[in-house]
Image (cartoon, rainbow, N blue to C red):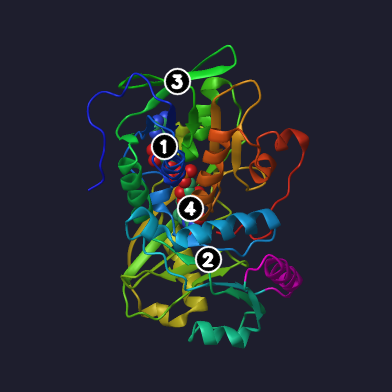
Amino acid sequence: MIPLSQGPVPATADAVLVGGGINGLATAYELARRGLKNIVVIEQNYIGSGSTGRCGGGIRQQWTTAENIRLAQESVALYEKMSAELGYQVFFRQGGYLMITESEADLPALREAVALQNRCSVPTEFLQPAECLKIVPELDVSRLKGATFCPRDGTAYPFAVVWGYARACHRLGVKIFIRTAVRDILSDDGRVLGVETDRGRISAPVVVNCAGPWARHLAAKVGVELPNRQERHEIMVSESLKPFLDPMVISITNGIYFSQSLRGEIVGGIGDPHEPHWQDPADFDTRSQLRFAVRFARALIQLYPRAAEVRLMRQWAGLYDVTPDHRPILGGVPGLGGYYHICGFSGHGFMLGPVTGRRMAAQITTGHPDEIINSLSLSRFENGDLQTDAFVVG
Ligand SMILES: Cc1cc2nc3c(=O)[nH]c(=O)nc-3n(C[C@H](O)[C@H](O)[C@H](O)COP(=O)(O)OP(=O)(O)OC[C@H]3O[C@@H](n4cnc5c(N)ncnc54)[C@H](O)[C@@H]3O)c2cc1C
């Protein structure tokens, strides 16, 4: 059972977090762990109902910017002890990530990435196509040109992670309200005053916008313009099979990714360049399409021919909250004290949520600048300080 607060929302709080996904809950937990009292999480639907509950659960350190590598490393360290720390089994498994390419042109970038990751103490190695068979026997390596493998990457079960954070939050006194929507963020004279929900007003000096794909819409309530756009990403699960696949396999050529869950299902998706982008929540479309099932099945069978014998059981879709450089937007905005956002994670907010929650909570409670949060502030889009990681896949 997830302990949820019943009855009316409190009239006052020390901090309100909007969104019951990994970012809202991890940040609430970290704020409470640092001793902040009277924290309230407001979720318009149910815990994990946004992108978090629809994601593939992948956690990797194989990135091409030092900042992403560092965040991912810190997150892996948090995931490694998460079940013990939260007192809840989150099913984190380090089966590794095998990143493959079918293009010779990618090889220099892969080798450079390995060198950078090794300099950051991430134990990635470059593999020739035939060497991939040691990691995934029966992979069709005939079209592969190379791969990288990091054995310390892995997966966790997304719902267990948010349930674990929710229970730990509750133990620390955080109140979580579901089926409650934030309609407005209140502010006056350059300071946040609280939120207006559909169940009443909460006065609070700190409001953190962790609304995922809805963050742009919410930020506009206080005149903050986020450049985020939303796009549908589909994912599917097969019938359960005997264990045969330890790592997440991900192709930087066509964006397919797949892993095997503890229940034996193949879980995977593939990016689709033809998906439209939206900015208005009224346009969001998370219906499933046959087109996805066909594209995914074809790409999977090409890489792993035995999969042709496997039945697909279920598919669903969720939204990526995408920024122009595919990096998250963190921190506050000048001229609006007490307002913060943690959003724009594209396809990697599940893996980064624990560490961004920890770093943001430290900044909110101490006011000390954080080098990485500063580099991910909204102002980078005005300053033109954009660097895109080459391994944005999916
Ligand atoms: C198909 C798919 C696969 C993915 N795979 C991976 C992966 O393998 N690894 C990875 O790291 N990432 C993955 N991602 C991305 C990841 O899911 C997201 O980056 C991450 O879950 C974002 O978490 P969040 O807490 O910021 O947002 P969300 O989980 O979307 O939570 C935001 C919450 O805010 C609530 N909300 C919004 N507006 C309001 C309001 N006004 N009032 C109250 N509540 C509100 C929503 O209902 C929602 O529950 C994937 C995403 C998709 C769609």
Instruction: Give the class, few, some or many, for how many residues have Cα within 10 Å of label 1's Cα (few <14, many ≥20).
Output: many
Question: Of the residues under marks 2 and 4, which one precedes in the sequence?
Answer: 2
- Labels 4 & 1 near each other (Cβ < 8 A): no
Front residue (pair 141, 11): 11
Residue that carries the numbered disc 1 in the rendered image? 19
Residue that carries the numbered disc 3 in the rendered image? 194
Name the residue located 51 percent from the left edge and 66 percent from the top edge.
Answer: 257
Q: Amino acid at mark 1?
A: Gly
Instruction: Give the class, few, some or many, for how many residues have Cα within 10 Å of label 3's Cα (few <14, many ≥20).
Output: many
Q: Is residue 271 left or right of residue 7?
A: right
Q: Position of residue 8 (x, y in %)?
A: 26, 23
Gap in Å between the C-alphas at discs 3 and 1? 15 Å
Question: Of the residues under marks 3 and 1, which one precedes in the sequence?
Answer: 1
Quarter of the image where one finds residue 141: bottom right
Q: Is residue 194 magenta?
A: no
> Among all residues in the image, which is located at the extreme top?
189
Instruction: Give the class, few, some or many, for how many residues have Cα within 10 Å of label 2's Cα (few <14, many ≥20).
Output: many
Gap in Å between the C-alphas at discs 3 and 4? 27 Å
Residue that carries the numbered disc 4 in the rendered image? 350
Q: Amino acid at mark 2?
A: Ile
Name the dominant secondary structure of the magenta segment. helix
User: Quick one: SS at disc 4?
Assistant: helix
Q: Amino acid at mark 3?
A: Gly
- Labels 3 & 2 near each other (Cβ < 8 A): no
Name the residue located 37 percent from the left edge and 31 percent from the top edge.
Answer: 40
The tag on residue 103 is none
- Taking 80 as reference, is 223 above or below it? above
